[in-house]
Image (cartoon, coloured by chain):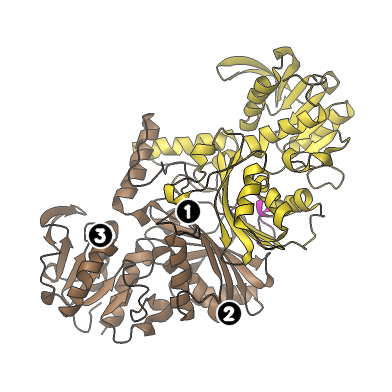
Chain colours: A brown, B yellow
Amino acid sequence: MALSSQPRVAIVGATGAVGQELIRLLQERWQLPPEDLVLLGSRSRMVELAGRQLQVQSAAEFDFTTAGLAFFSAGAGISAVLALKACNAGCVVIDNTSQFRYEPDVPLVIPPINAAAIGNARLIANPNCTTAIILMALAPLHRAFGLKRLIVATYQAASGAGQQAMDELRAQTRAAADGVPLTHHRFPHQLLYNLIPRIDRVYDDGYTREEKKLAWETRKILLGQPLENLTVPIEATCVRVPTLRCHAASVHLQTHRIVDLAKARDVLAQAPGVVVLDDAAQDQYPTPLAFGGRNEVGVGRLRQSAAFGAHGLAFWVCGDQLLRGAALNAIEIAECVFPRQ
Amino acid sequence: MALSSQPRVAIVGATGAVGQELIRLLQERWQLPPEDLVLLGSRSRMVELAGRQLQVQSAAEFDFTTAGLAFFSAGAGISAVLALKACNAGCVVIDNTSQFRYEPDVPLVIPPINAAAIGNARLIANPNCTTAIILMALAPLHRAFGLKRLIVATYQAASGAGQQAMDELRAQTRAAADGVPLTHHRFPHQLLYNLIPRIDRVYDDGYTREEKKLAWETRKILLGQPLENLTVPIEATCVRVPTLRCHAASVHLQTHRIVDLAKARDVLAQAPGVVVLDDAAQDQYPTPLAFGGRNEVGVGRLRQSAAFGAHGLAFWVCGDQLLRGAALNAIEIAECVFPRQ
């Protein structure tokens, strides 16, 4: 695909798990010549990525006036320091961190849902990975039936904590097989054979920031409401599970309008970026292994709500945390700003 | 502990994961002499359990008049054939399968919750493992605040599918470490690094039998209602996760009365068999690894419901599937029938 005007692209956090997916997607989708891709990191060095030696430059020293587009995926702290600098240097910035997501003037965008929110913005926020995956399925259902109340329990993969977290889970697997002690550094507990019901920091009300992000970002993206508008109550439990790169969630919603299950299935089947895989009796449902590496999120276990009756739905959703949850969504935002010819 | 009258004990399904826990608990708690414990299986053979050679007799050929108490843990099909025969031979039968749980005249019992339901029954059903673990925490909260609506997402360990399922998960771990193909037979998909959002058979309404069991058994045990009474709506998603022997659940409830969080914490702390471990900011919450092998279920992440406001609660619960979920609960039932001296 050619873009209307091919910008020179900088990736801040290029060696991370999301950064590597960004590089792969940019090459696949844009056929970006190597000289138009600048990899930025904490310091200048050569790195091996996908078997190739690549130059990484220091993000802090990079002259952003030489790029037209910058992806930020190196943590909120780096975005806080460098994203506005890149913007002021003339870059369109797509920020994968939570640094600017909750600023009223910064669009928070999942392109298949609210691309129009981008407008003329030069700084656009990419949503939380779990939120992005869940909303892909929830948005068409909300349009059809009206979201009234939402309860979610998540099953989040190691990749959400970065490349080293995935490496740690694999290392624990080897240690368990070898019968040697398992160690952990990236997570507060061993993840193999375990569950960690805390992601991100904990607020005084007992909810984690990850759980609040799901509520805040659903309000901003889906409902167009301020973060703290409680008209649609949203409750989540976010749990780290020993999977590698695909998040999943059990989603329970109450609706304003009576849900017709066949219609629900139909709007999901027609939703861009969504695959319905729903024949549980034949063991057809999305799993992290099956949806790892896929651009689409999978929806299954669709059924009428036992809690809310005809005014509700339950479903299971699964999506690649590094793709829809991060890199793919960011690239799709870029493709809205620099549209296809 | 001595029992008022020490019965001779038969265990049907003695070599299974639950059977092995029953043997261990009987030895620990009752100091049962070896000649008073009869291990029954599909056929007569010698087996090695915990490093000892033990005689297993054929359950079908066993004379139940020689025993006073029989635990059944070999699948509903075996219970259907042999449990009533054992009862009629004079045994008290404690059935760990779902065969009789939903018969109105068969008590379904979690002793810390509804021991009185046993009455003079000679056939007593042990609940579904997930239900038993969740209700340990839910029962005191229901007594304090009144359950109005319940939404649960589970994180269920391999042990719920038996010893061979645990072995399969361990074998997949070794295969992943060795870089050889992973195989699966006990589960419909690979479990390592994966999630399987289906447990037990699927009904036409899209719910699985495991999900219905949670609703049915909560109604029977906690509410004393018929299974299909929908006064308290209950909705669940039951998911198999790659853990070994501890089930967990994210529990979301709406209550009749306003919830005082401090009181909720207090009733949980005082509930027998429940441990409150709730300081998420310090990474104190129950995990499957920490609660494997423990008799108590752990509760953490206690917080006011964002979905139902002051009339609701959310929490995380974790418990050993083989103990509270099966063997320990069965032994406690036996100790009600044959009380301590």
The disc numbered 1 marks a residue on which chain?
A: A
Q: CA distance from mark 3 to mark 2?
A: 37 Å
- Compared with A204, B43 (above or below) is above
Instruction: Name the residue beneath numbered marker 2.
Output: A146
Numbered label attached to residue A20: 3
Numbered label attached to residue A239: 1
Q: CA distance from mark 2 to mark 1?
A: 27 Å
The disc numbered 3 marks a residue on which chain?
A: A
The local crowd at label 1, few if under 14, some if 14 to 19, many if 20 or more residues have their Cα within 10 Å, is many
Q: In the rendered image, which quarter contains the C terminus of chain A?
A: bottom left
Q: Residue furthest bottom?
A: A120
Along the viewing direction, whichever of A316 and B92 lies nearer the viewer: B92
Left or right of residue B45, residue A109 in this image? left
Asked if both marks, 2 and 1, belong to the same chain, the answer given is yes
Left or right of residue A53, residue B216 in this image? right
- Reading the chain from its start, which is encountered first: label 3 or label 1? 3
Question: In the image, what residue occupies the spot 52% across and 62% down?
Answer: A236
Q: Which residues are magenta?
A: B197-211
Instruction: Tell me the mark number nearer the camera, choosing from 3 and 2.
Output: 2
Residue type at mark 3 is: Gln
- Reading the chain from its start, which is encountered first: label 3 or label 2? 3
Say if mark 2 contacts mark 1, CB within 8 Å. Answer: no
Question: In the image, what residue occupies the spot 25% across and 77% down?
Answer: A1
